[in-house]
Amino acid sequence: MDRDVDLEAKTRETGREIHAAMSGAPVMFDSTRWIGGIMDWAMKNEDFKLRLFRFIDVLPSLKTNELVVRVLHEYFSGETEIPRIVSGGIEMLSKTGFIPHLAGPLIRKSVGSIARQFIAGKDADDTLKALDVLRRDGTDFSIDLLGEVVVSEKEARTYAGRYHSLLDVLSAGFSPGARPDVSIKVSSFYSQLDPIDWAGSIEKTKEGLRPLLRKARDLGISITFDMEHYYYKGLIIEIFKGILEEEEFREFPSAGIALQAYLNDTTNDVLDLIGWARARGRSIAIRLVKGAYWDYEVVVNRQKGWPVPVFLNKEETDASFERLTRLLFENTDVVRPAIASHNLRSISHAITCAEALNAPKGSFEFQMLYGMAEPLRKAVRESGFNMRVYTPVGELIPGMAYLVRRLLENTSNESFLRKSFGEKSSFEELIRAPQARRVSSGSGVVDEHFRNEPLFDFSMARNREAMDQAIRTVKEHTDRKYPLYIGGREVTTEKYIVSRNPARPGEIIGRVSSASKKEADAAIEEALNVREVWRKTTPEKRAGYLVRAAEELRRKRTKLAALEVLEVGKTRRDADADVCEAIDYLEYYGREMLRLGVPATLGNYPGEENEYRYEPKGIGVVISPWNFPLAIATGMTSAAIVTGNCVIFKPSGLSPLIGRELCEIYRSTGLPAGVLQFLPGPGSEVGEYLVSHPSIDFIAFTGSREVGLRIVERAGMFVPGQRNVKKVIAEMGGKNAIIVDETADLDEAVKSIVESAFGYQGQKCSACSRVIVAGDTFKELCDRLMEAAKSIRIGPPEEPGTFLGPVIDEAAMKKIRTDIEIGKKEGTIILERNAPGEGHFVGPVIVIDVKPGSRMATEEIFGPVLSIMRANDLDEAISLANDSLYALTGGLFSRSPANIQKVKEEFRVGNLYINRKITGALVGRQPFGGFGMSGTGTKAGGTDYLLQFMNPVSISENTIRRGFAPLTKD
Ligand code: FDA
């Protein structure tokens, strides 16, 4: 305790000395300068800050002055209150009359000077001058090459090449005594880096890193691995350790890694690295940072329903930083601590720790970011400590993510810099020891009602291993026979539907009995027997079955996903997402039925009681597809069941085993016999027969337009004995387009288009099959898309690194290949990748200059084929996008508020996505379904979906007896 008091006193003393030595303020906080004035206003006005940072983000990619001025207006035209210093700027701009060729350069220059506060130069040569200034007082540097997003292997190679040139410049341009360091972003060395493919990602990234490390070692330049998003943390640490264990790098003395104190599991990582270094008798540098992605980690992990990995209270981060600082200084035999902070308290505490643990001044260093805290940097350096400045180099477009992080960091309410230089807090306030008030990280999701089932986080070893194990287990039990399920009995028929692995068609996954008209009649009979009992079962009880089914699905989660991988060729991630969506439907529709199950009272008139409630329709057929074999089947069956109907469930003949699993899940809940019956069989026989049967009241169908329209036709034909007009709930295809305008963030656009177009081999009804480019980014976008599509891995989906697996069967493969031949005539193929010989594989294809109205532009292709079209402007792009019989999903990539608004109003699709992929709709968040030829306007996973399975009933009772009536409630 005494020792702590003593350390605290020394920390204050050290802090006071450094504080006294500081003079001036960083430009960002100098309110007499225009940059300081703008930042000051941004800190006081959140809305202005949002607009300002968004404008700064888009500016470098705006290619013309006209566009710069237009987008400036869009962002700031609603701004009424503006600070004098900004209005001064606007006055200056207005003197240019906002004439683009005068105003444009002025705006660029202004934003350029903000960027120059944090980015030292465009390239290494350009940066040498800035480094010279630092070197004058003996400050060292670590260079970071901006350009963080790498969407293809070509871009990864270019990025690595830039690092090689940087090393050359550094080795030639530096004076003796300098200890140059280079910081690298590991994720930029392999475009397909993904923890789901743990071993593959490590191997490929190491391949990219080795030449660089070799060169750095030979030139005597140290390398530090930056730490990135939490999702990559485990991989980055493994890559760091793995490569340094290789013979040629065992002696590489100058390698280091950044670790983030804002994560609640960093102590384990530090201990692990210390143990690892000690066991190998080597030393490593650990750069301790608080962490640059706090906002991202909170938002993204909450969005995914994953635990938030960062502390939610700033003082906890500060306290963690101090604990970790101490841990590093306690282990200087194997660790060279680099304390990276701009916080006077954190730095003073580190100095005190070092002294208390007798760490010589030369055995550690402080590090700061270029342009962040000059007064503090100088004061610490003048006190005789080693100092290194992290110096970013590069152009503005690739540097934008970095710049925005710095702006956020400076203007955050919690920022030490803001408190110190912006709010001018007292020394006492600045030096105060962090009070670690715990704020639960939890999942952070506050919605106590429906919550989406979180997808697996594949950065967790346990999830990867569970999936490996499940795939092995399913493979051990292939080629078994399964019966139908009719009225509580298992029924075996003579004919079987054979389910095959589309990646290896010789591999039979299982065989399921195939129903004929005879079994269909038996099932209808059973349904008729139980219909009344089920109708009278309360909504609460019916919802209870769904909740139990959801529990069972959770229990079998990996097994079901593994089965999807093998039966329909989904990648592990897509298969898991399908299982989660199935759970969501059960949980969501169960809750929805509780809401709808309460009769509504209409009006409030004396002498009359009006009630509005819902009745089940009766008996329905659910005909589900193979592409979301569990989710869609579960969605349609559970909606029908929970609303009080009996269901005959006919899964696709291409995914009968998953259908059978769903049937087993319902059985396990104790659902009364006859409420759900499992009847796979040929569509032309059993499907048609059921649809036309007089006892069937509704048909819920998801699949092709051809079959959907045939069902509508059949259902509309009266047959003797029929008592209801049959309701058809049909979800069909799409010819979905993504518009990319001239303000789009191409990094995001390319990643999302690749995922939307080629995810699950383009076999999602929401998949992107057309990209329409408005503006002059056509060539750049096409080149980047082509390279990105070249980089994705094609192979059997059971392999964790596979992005693109096989299409569902031979017929699909042949049809897609025919479509590609048509594409060759109607446009220019810029990419056609080969695919493995065995299995139903089709490599990704990109066709450009597709003409409006051509087959490529209008007809659905259920495969990995993407057409790219040009439009002169946004109006033309919208008109091309709407030029389709379908209206299912659509997307826009844009950073122009006006364009976003216009597209919201004019792009006519059921599901519109802005600045994100167009697949992956979530239950309750993006209710899914289209209109036009895409379907009958239903929205799966939305508030009105269940209504289609019920008939509304209105009951009005006259409550007047002999002139008196119960009182009405006011
Ligand atoms: P200060 O004391 O003001 O702390 C700000 C930090 O506190 C935020 O950045 C955040 O981490 C945390 N925080 C803010 N609000 C919080 C809240 N409500 N609850 C909990 N914590 C909160 N970063 C990175 O992630 N990977 C890297 O590789 C590097 N590399 C790097 C190198 C060098 C040399 C430096 C100087 C910095 C980095 N950084 C980094 C960036 C670094 O993470 C960032 O600059 C620091 O977090 C800022 O911390 P300070 O101590 O300077 O400020």
Image (cartoon, rainbow, N blue to C red):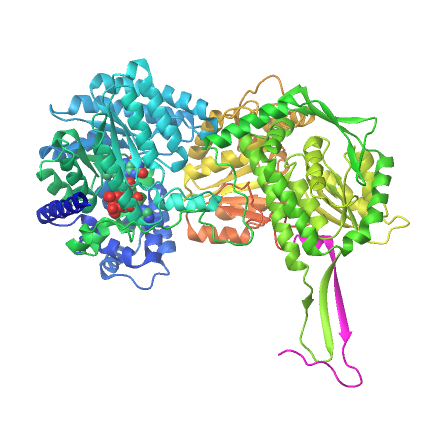
View quadrant of ligand 1: top left
Residue 294: x and y in percent read: 35, 44
Q: Answer yes or no: is residue 850 visible.
A: no
Residue 508: x and y in percent read: 69, 21
Query: Taking 437 as reference, is 828 left or right?
Result: right
- Residue projecting furthest to the top: 247
Q: For the C terminus, which image quadrant?
A: bottom right
User: What are the residue bounds of the magenta stretch?
Assistant: 945-970
The structure residue drawn at horizontal position 54% and vertical position 49%, both measured from the top left corner, is 451
The structure residue drawn at horizontal position 33% and vertical position 64%, both measured from the top left corner, is 80
Q: Between residue 80 and residue 212, name the one nearer to us.
A: 212
Residue 227: x and y in percent read: 32, 34
Q: Quadrant of residue 37?
A: bottom left
The structure residue drawn at horizontal position 17% and vertical position 53%, both measured from the top left corner, is 30
Query: Taking 528 as reference, is 108 left or right?
Result: left
Q: Between residue 864 and residue 800, name the one nearer to us.
A: 800
Q: For the N terminus, which image quadrant?
A: top left
Residue 582 lies within the magenta run: no
Q: Between residue 241 and residue 544, name the one nearer to us.
A: 544
- Residue projecting furthest to the front: 1
